[in-house]
Amino acid sequence: MKRVAIPVVSGKLSKYFAQCNHYEIFEIDGLDIKRDEIRVPSAKEIDMLLPWVSSQSITDVITYKVDKRILELFTNYKINLYVGIKIDSPREIIQDYLNGTLKSDKNIIAEIMTQY
């Protein structure tokens, strides 16, 4: 069972992981979506947000951009991170995830890797 979180603003993938209105969380078993829920974390600061993500039993996070320092934090929490994903609706993104067609924008990845 996987729990995949997508940060959402105005019905679409948020531009930044920590800057969203809520997270849409999909519970997935194999290729089936078993449950879809919206969660709003109590904290927005990264130091508090990642423990919250972990406490929700989230296994994967799909996002457009993150700060480079966050990459290591995700590794510490053993959460898979998909970065550089095109901005679209959570339903379209999760379908790409399930179909194995989720693609990262190489320019976004390069931009993140050149930070700091």
Image (spheres, rainbow, N blue to C red):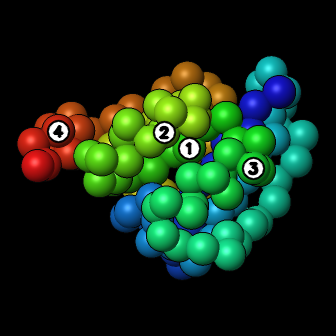
| Residue at image mark 1 | 61
Q: Nearer the viewer, residue 95 or 38?
A: 38
3D distance between C-alphas at marks 2 and 3: 13 Å
Q: Nearer the viewer, mark 3 or mark 1?
A: 3
3D distance between C-alphas at marks 1 and 4: 18 Å
Q: Secondary structure at mark 3?
A: helix
3D distance between C-alphas at marks 4 and 3: 28 Å
Q: Amino acid at mark 4?
A: Met
**Pointer 1 and pointer 2: residues touching (CB < 8 Å)?**
yes
| Residue at image mark 2 | 74
Left or right placement of residue 52 versus residue 1 in this view? left
Q: Residue 44: image x %, image y %?
A: 53, 73
Dot placed on the residue nearer the N-terminal end, 3 or 1:
3
Q: Residue 23: image x %, image y %?
A: 64, 63
Dot placed on the residue nearer the N-terminal end, 2 or 4:
2
Dot placed on the residue nearer the N-terminal end, 1 or 2:
1
Residue at screen point 77% across, 50% down: 56
Q: Which mark is residue 55?
A: 3
Q: Secondary structure at mark 2?
A: helix
3D distance between C-alphas at marks 1 and 2: 9 Å
Crowd tier of the residue under label 4, counting other residues whose Cα lies within 10 Å: few below 14, some 14–19, many 20 or above: few
Q: Amino acid at mark 3?
A: Ser
Crowd tier of the residue under label 3, counting other residues whose Cα lies within 10 Å: few below 14, some 14–19, many 20 or above: few
Crowd tier of the residue under label 1, counting other residues whose Cα lies within 10 Å: few below 14, some 14–19, many 20 or above: many
Q: Amino acid at mark 2?
A: Phe
| Residue at image mark 4 | 113
Q: Amino acid at mark 1?
A: Val
Q: Nearer the viewer, mark 4 or mark 3?
A: 3
